[in-house]
Image (cartoon, grey):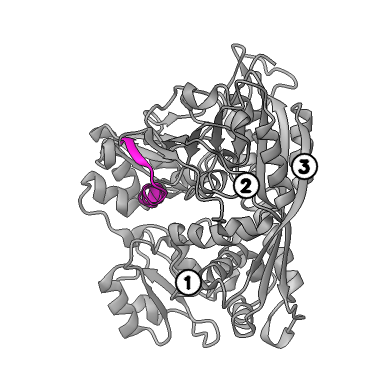
Amino acid sequence: MAKVSGAAPPTDVIAEELGYYPVSMSVDGKTIYAPARVKSSSTEQAVALANHLLDKGVVVYSAFWCPHCRNQREMFGKEAWAVLASTARECSPQGTKFKGACKGIDGYPAFTGMGGEGGVRSGEMELGQIAEFSGFKGFDKSKEPVVSNLGIPTSTFDSIITPSPSNGFLTKSSPSFYDALPPSPSRPPVLIDDNEKILSIASTHSSSPTTLKICHPSHTLHHALLLATSSIDPDFKFDPSLYLKSKNVIDEAAINPTTFNALRSSLLSLPPPFNTHLKVVDLGCGLLHMLRRLTDSAVGVLSSSTTSSSIQSLEYHAFETNPTLLPEILSSLSEMGFNTVSSSPPYTFFKEVSAPPPTKRSFISRFFSTPPPLPSTPSSVTVHLHMQDFRESPPPAATENVHLVVGSCFADLFDPDELARDLKLLSSSSPTLLYFPITYKGMTLLSPSSPSSPSLSIPSDTQAMRMYNTALTTDHKHNLESSLFTASLTRFGAKILSQSTSVWEIKKRLHPYMYDCMLYFFGSTTSSLFIEGNFSMRNWLARLRSQEKDITVYNTDILAKVRMDKKR
């Protein structure tokens, strides 16, 4: 067949250049999305594991845009993934808004056919874990590559100890392997392993290895490499629930009252019948901070109107993608006085809200000069909890006739145009309000700010924060320009009603866990750029801790209004 002039290259070739970004081509009038081609080579046991999974009927579910799915494919390697690809399912073949491809799958990658809750195991896993869960015998973790996608240049180390293939070369189980390592007192070899025998051999036969034992389930390969490069505090354990609890305190103090008051006024001025029943969709609910705020006795929308125009019922659809938060979310609902209506997904809860005594003012009311009027009749609140991404086959009950969409600390995590398009999944016959508070706008300051210290290989604080923002945008694809998001909303047909600055003020003595979380984020996010710049993350973090620098983060609160008509 003659070659067609100007024909597009194969989809997988384009995908290889673009990473996990969507790649589309026209086939029978449809748009097809393909993940990046796997680049790493497989070990023999990885191929054997893949064949074992295929024989057991294990199916891998993934999405082209998911970085964890990309990492998982690279762990298997191209030869092993070729085995699994015959039954693997792409859950977004026609884009993030495609519905029905992978029902029952809440997170990616996911494996069916090897146990787990509901027969599904979700999340990126090392091959040793997959072997254990699937019953594959004889898997030797020490034979799998240990340097992964952290982005650390190998020139950082004089020696990185990794497994060798069975081709006659020395392996880590041989004492002679360590005797042959070049001595380097200033930068000793780094050994990452969870094999007790190998650790024992290394400590006995090597004069100066840094041994790191991975024994805790949270010590993934990524975590181990961060520890090996002193990018994070070895005594700090990041807990998503504790982080969100600490963050909610910071958020509450930061939310700008001007934009929130504009939100309340807009909601309470909705025409009948929308002014009596309010439907809210929370795109990333966390521990339900926004639900607390909207139902607060001093500033919430259920208690700030006269009886004749009071919102009497609130229907709240909360989406959350992190399954580990479920116990804390349920605990928060119980603490707020909700009764369980349905204990199976989607979870449903209900409570009635009666008017508090007129003299009672909550902590939040400090933002207002006078208390707002209180209702004379009870209001009801119904919460529907969806443990899934709002873009992946949301139930119609959660997407139709929506009056308010909220996304706290949310909008900067996405490409602004894609997020604006994804909002088309929601619809309403009346104008919908969009409220995105705490949208990071790319400015973090340390006070007092310190200059560089070349003798200790420490960058200036300004330079370090610049590297932090660079890593967020290039490695994690965050959008740090809130103006781009508002511009996307405007192109989508929205009108910006209010926009104001909200500021996180984080102090070591007042917010100790949140402070440690921020240092953890700085280290884990910026480590590769520090290494490329020949800076010491350990020394820079030590300076931050010793001086107890205040951390100030500048955000934007955005309120917009748009007609969410799917026919547009």
Q: What residue type is labelled 2?
A: Leu
Read off the residue under disc 3.
Answer: 498
Q: Which numbered tag is attached to residue 227?
A: 1
Residue at point 67% right, 27% down?
270
Residue 263: where, in percent of width, then height? 68, 40
Label 2, label 3: how far apart the Cα atoms are: 21 Å
Residue at point 49% right, 34% down?
317
Q: Which amino acid does label 3 sit on?
A: Ser
Cβ–Cβ below 8 Å for labels 2 and 1? no
Q: Answer with the quarter of the image where residue 94 lies.
A: top right
From the viewer's side, name the closer residue of 409 and 313.
Answer: 313
Label 2, label 1: how far apart the Cα atoms are: 26 Å
**Label 1: few (<14), some or many (≥20) within 10 Å?**
some
> As drawn, is 133 to the left or to the right of 469?
left
**Label 2: few (<14), some or many (≥20) within 10 Å?**
some
Instruction: Provide the residue span drawn in magenta.
Output: 324-342
Task: Indicate which label's residue lies in the foreground, 2 or 3.
Answer: 3
Q: Which numbered tag is attached to residue 391?
A: none
In what quadrant of the picture does the C terminus appear?
top right
Please tell me which of labels 2 and 1 falls first in the chain.
1
Read off the residue under disc 2.
Answer: 413
Residue 356: where, in percent of width, then height? 50, 48
Residue 221: where, in percent of width, then height? 43, 61
